[in-house]
Amino acid sequence: MTKIYEALQWASSFLKEKERDENAGELLLRFFLQMDRTKMLANLREELDIEVENRFHGAVELHGEGTPVQYIIGHEEFYGRTFRVNECVLIPRPETEELVLGALTRVSQRFGGDQSMDVVDIGTGSGAIAISLKLERPELSVTASDISEGALAVAHGNAERLGADVEFVKGDLLQPFIEAGRKFDVVISNPPYIPLGDKVDMSVVVTAHEPHTALFAGEDGLDLYRQFAEELPIVLKEKAMVGFEVGAGQSKAVSGLLQKAFPEAHIETVYDINGKDRMVFMEIGVD
């Protein structure tokens, strides 16, 4: 019978050989054992149940071939909550938590603390942004859209499980809201922004498994921001805010697109915890 520490040693060695994250073995074993880290470390000399060991081996081999750990275990943590994910949606990243925090801070600062506002999250994926905003500020009226039926099913499931009253709409960027004549106080989005040419240098863990429609956006990665710049003037209220996540090095171009569409706007670039220009916020009609 294999002991826990032996299984971890095997996984670490196997994943190192495959040039994957060696720590993934610990995450996977904790998942199959349903133990937190402290409990697992206290039981390193315990023997593994044969069924658990077989499932663990299979999962480690899957990750070795490139399947992200989050898709294997079916969830990822975001803003203090657990979101279910599958290959229909992008895995939520820590950088996007900073977009949520930045949006919440600016909503409070610029628009007051407790008023109801109409907020839309475009390209919601797993629903992480929209659901987090709603649960952090229940007075907000939050809508989320995506072009993918599969993504909307995941997001809807996460909203139900986490108790977030979010409206979900299928459609391409702001088109369904333009057609319905709807206007918003806040538009927030983490759209696809990776240039197609970057694909060759990216990890197969990402390119072979995460949805390409949620990753890539034309030759320079700016296609979706151009579409936003055309559509935003139709859906924003007179006093409004926009928050985008952008790829490192794209903030100047994205700011330029917004400034051209809204010459009087206040536009701000925000750097993430790693010092990369990761967010662009725009405010209009605010004193």
Image (cartoon, rainbow, N blue to C red):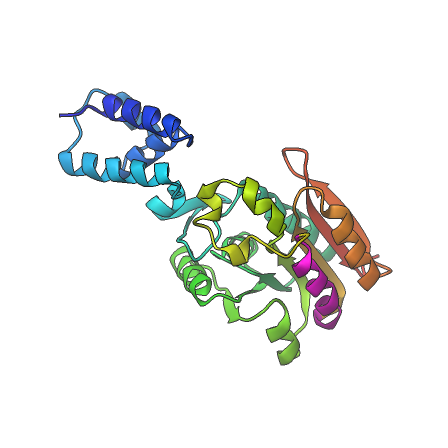
| Quarter of the rendering occupied by the C terminus | bottom right
What residue is at 25 percent from the left and 26 percent from the top?
Answer: 7
Q: Is residue 127 above or below residue 23?
A: below
Residues shaded magenta: 221-235
Q: Is residue 9 above or below residue 205?
A: above
Rendering coords of residue 20 (x, y %): 42, 32
Q: Could you say which quadrant of the image residue 249 lies in?
A: top right
Report the number of numbered marks.
0
Instruction: Depth check: give the residue in front, 28 or 203.
Output: 203
Instruction: Depth check: give the residue in front, 198 or 2.
Output: 198
Rendering coords of residue 277 (x, y %): 70, 41
Q: Is residue 99 above or below residue 117?
A: above
Instruction: Depth check: give the residue in front, 127 or 63.
Output: 63
Q: Is residue 211 left or right of residue 42?
A: right
What residue is at 53 percent from the left and 41 percent from the top?
Answer: 202
As for residue 58 lying within the magenta part, the answer is: no
- Taking the view exactly as shown, the residue that stands out farthest to the right is 264
Q: Is residue 70 left or right of residue 233?
A: left
- Taking the view exactly as shown, the residue that stands out farthest to the top is 45
Q: Is residue 181 visible?
A: yes
Q: Is residue 43 visible?
A: no
Q: Is residue 62 left or right of residue 85?
A: left
What residue is at 60 percent from the left and 45 percent from the top?
Answer: 198
As for residue 224 lying within the magenta part, the answer is: yes
Identify the main secondary structure in magenta.
helix
Q: Is residue 105 above or below residue 164?
A: above
Rendering coords of residue 139 (x, y %): 58, 61
Q: Could you say which quadrant of the image residue 217 lies in?
A: bottom right
What residue is at 59 percent from the left and 62 percent from the top?
Answer: 122
